[in-house]
Image: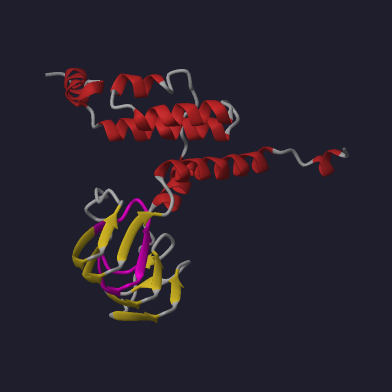
């Protein structure tokens, strides 16, 4: 068999029909094109947001691909690196703190911003409230446990979309409301919320939706490309 024939056969084996590809992979490729073309000023903000909504809502491969059929620019390495940095979980190496305890009695406290997540967080809310915001937190362990004792109080937990959340709580005249999807990648951090709730509540929610993150990232890229593409008028004597 000739080299050309072998090459053609290998090429044929990797060809997959569009409808047989994972739809989330197709969706991601199209959204990348939309963001890239919007950031370069090829499409308007109205067109970008309309197409983005349709790409995220559709479950039809051909409908999704058609949304970027007229966009010809190719996503480059700079975009891919910036996206990976923006959307990846804040994993870091180093010693993992074992435990942290937060106690609120007829009071309240917030934990947010850039902070290191320990393996275990104990939250005690008695007629008080705690807000745990993992959005910009730094994870050093894949599995994190939040142990909650909530009596006539409230515990709010905010997480990014690329984190798994599992709830294991016992509630009396109270409840746990978990609005997260819990379908992140297997390598993503998993937060297990367990404990006891009496006449109180634990709310678990995503601080920013994926669409909000896409729009914010697109605007950031647009600002970056606009800055780099502006001519230096001082050198031209304007």
> In the image shown, does 118 or 107 lie closer to the viewer?
107
Q: Looking at the image, which residue sits at the far left?
A: 1
User: Which image quarter holds the N terminus?
Assistant: top left
Q: Is residue 140 magenta?
A: yes
The magenta stretch is 139-165
Question: Residue 45 at what x, y percent from top left?
Answer: 57, 31
User: Which image quarter holds the C terminus?
Assistant: top right
Instruction: Name which residue lies at 48% across and 22% down.
Output: 71
Instruction: Name which residue lies at 24% across and 56% down.
Output: 187
Q: Report the magenta stretch's main SS.
A: strand
Say which quarter of the image contains residue 197. bottom left
Confirm whether residue 55 shows in the render: yes
Say which quarter of the image contains residue 42. top right
Confirm whether residue 92 shows in the render: no
Instruction: Name which residue lies at 42% across and 22% down.
Output: 67
Question: Residue 33 at what x, y percent from top left?
Answer: 45, 31
């Amino acid at each position: 068999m000739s080299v050309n024939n072998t090459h053609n056969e290998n090429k044929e084996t990797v060809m997959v029909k569009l409808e047989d590809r994972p739809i989330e992979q197709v969706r991601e490729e199209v959204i990348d094109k939309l963001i890239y073309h919007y950031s370069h000023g090829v499409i308007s903000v109205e067109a970008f947001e309309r197409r983005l909504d349709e790409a995220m809502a559709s479950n039809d491969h051909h409908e999704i691909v058609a949304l970027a059929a007229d966009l010809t620019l190719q996503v480059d390495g700079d975009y891919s690196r910036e996206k990976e940095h923006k959307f990846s979980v804040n994993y870091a190496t180093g010693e993992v703190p074992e435990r942290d305890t937060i106690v609120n009695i007829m009071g309240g406290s917030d934990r947010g911003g850039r902070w290191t997540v320990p393996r275990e967080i104990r939250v005690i809310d008695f007629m008080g409230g705690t807000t745990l915001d993992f959005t910009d937190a730094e994870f050093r362990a894949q599995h994190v446990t939040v142990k909650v004792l909530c009596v006539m109080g409230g515990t709010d937990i905010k997480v990014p979309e690329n984190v798994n959340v599992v709830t294991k709580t016992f509630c009396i005249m109270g409840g746990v409301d978990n609005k997260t999807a819990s379908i992140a990648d297997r390598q993503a951090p998993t937060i297990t919320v367990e404990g006891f709730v009496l006449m109180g509540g634990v709310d678990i929610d995503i601080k920013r939706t994926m669409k909000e993150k896409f729009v914010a990232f697109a605007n950031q890229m647009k600002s970056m490309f606009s800055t780099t593409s502006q001519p230096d008028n001082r050198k031209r004597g304007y």
